[in-house]
Amino acid sequence: MAAGIDAPVLFNLAVLLSASFIVGELFERIGLESIIGYIVTGLLLGPAVLDIIQPGSMAAFGTIGATLILFQAGLREENAADIFRHRKGLDLGLGVLIGSFLFIITALVFFGPRFLPYSGAREFIFIALAYAVVDIGVPSKLMLSQGMLRDETGTYTIKSSVINVTAGLGVLTVLVLATSSTLESLLIQVGSIASFALAFFILHEFIHRIDDYIVMLEETEAQFAITFALLLFMAYATEAIGLSSVLGAFFAGVIVSRSEFSESHAFQEKISAIGEGLFIPIFFAWFGLGLHIFGSSGMLANIEAAAFLFLLSTVSKFGIGYAISRKHEMDKPFTIASSLLSLDIETLVILLIGIDLGVLSPQIQQIFAPAVLFSTITIVLLYSVKDRF
């Protein structure tokens, strides 16, 4: 028997990847996010429409894509402590996270059972947290397209987004711990997380000591290999202690961001190429493979629930973002608030972890899917209004 991946899996991967880029490019040309194109590709090729590719065959590739996304998010900061030293960004990032979480969970307690197939406190907490975090990628793209990425507005928006997501992932870690069913398992998890935190601190604080040895490996390929190995080890460690592989990937990105070689153009190009050019499209396409259009658990049947959650998230984030930006006397509070509305990978990761823990049912994927399209269209419209008036 031949070793390796089955030929049908290779063929399906080739079909999924090539189709994702074609459809993603088409969506980019009409002014929408390519990510929506990736999801649509998976939807069309999956059981919902053509039934060419099964979600399970792409699950491993999708998992790697999720870890690379969070790894790149961690790479955005040179020092974990510096994430929370930008005072204005701290106010906005935490203000949006806490304020939106409280607003959403309050609405869920009173109206959630009417719109959603959930009624428990744990379910509402996971959903509220998922919809309270903001996307890092969309603010970056918007600021870049407007030529504001390097000015005060761009720095303020990006810093606050990073703070929001970092704090949200920290809360997610606590939620994962809270799911432990017995005192013994809780103590084991706490001890494991404490050991992981110590290892992270040592690597974070002393990576510059070993950075010189890594830089001596002049080949970018060797530096990339070491980085990717660290990513996989950290992802495995957090998965092994009962958290999530994506959390380990994020922490790995924060560690690597402290190294000298991570600033090189060649290194960043390789990370971007393998992430954005391969695994990230596969991740969103894999997510699309698991979606359904029709049926009692399909997207159309859940469109009311999707609109309900999207409305709660949008109203709270925009209102809080605008108010805090005005308080800080920022020049473009409308632009800043609009940039914080996207629902994307960070929200999806929290929901998927909720599914893995048994807190949420897979139906939440059908509820979340339209939110990516809703949020993108809303941001485009708000930017158009801003440009007009």
Image: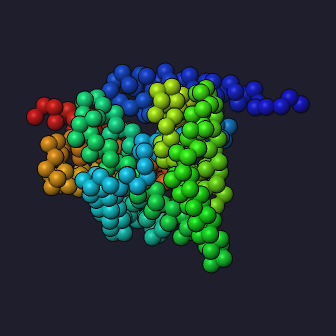
Residue nearest the observer in this picture, 95 or 266: 266
Is residue 326 found left or right of 253 in the rendered image? left
Farthest left residue?
A: 389
Farthest right residue?
A: 1
| Picture coordinates of residue 208, whole percent (x, y) | 52, 45
Look at the picture and state if 189 lies above or below 42: below
| Picture coordinates of residue 252, whole percent (x, y) | 55, 47
| Picture coordinates of residue 297, whole percent (x, y) | 51, 50
Residue drawn where x is 50% and y is 66% of the image: 174
Quarter of the image where the N terminus is located? top right
Residue 358 seen:
no
Residue drawn where x is 41% and y is 22% of the image: 26
Residue nearest the observer in this picture, 72 or 97: 72
Look at the picture and state if 322 lies above or below 212: below
| Picture coordinates of residue 23, whole percent (x, y) | 47, 24
Residue drawn where x is 32% and y is 65% of the image: 102
Residue 94 seen:
yes
Look at the picture and state if 338 lies above or below 271: below
Residue nearest the observer in this picture, 252 or 318: 252
Is residue 157 found left or right of 28 in the rendered image? left
Give the color scheme: rainbow, by chain, secondary structure or one colour.
rainbow
Quarter of the image where the C terminus is located? top left
Residue nearest the observer in this picture, 111 or 243: 243
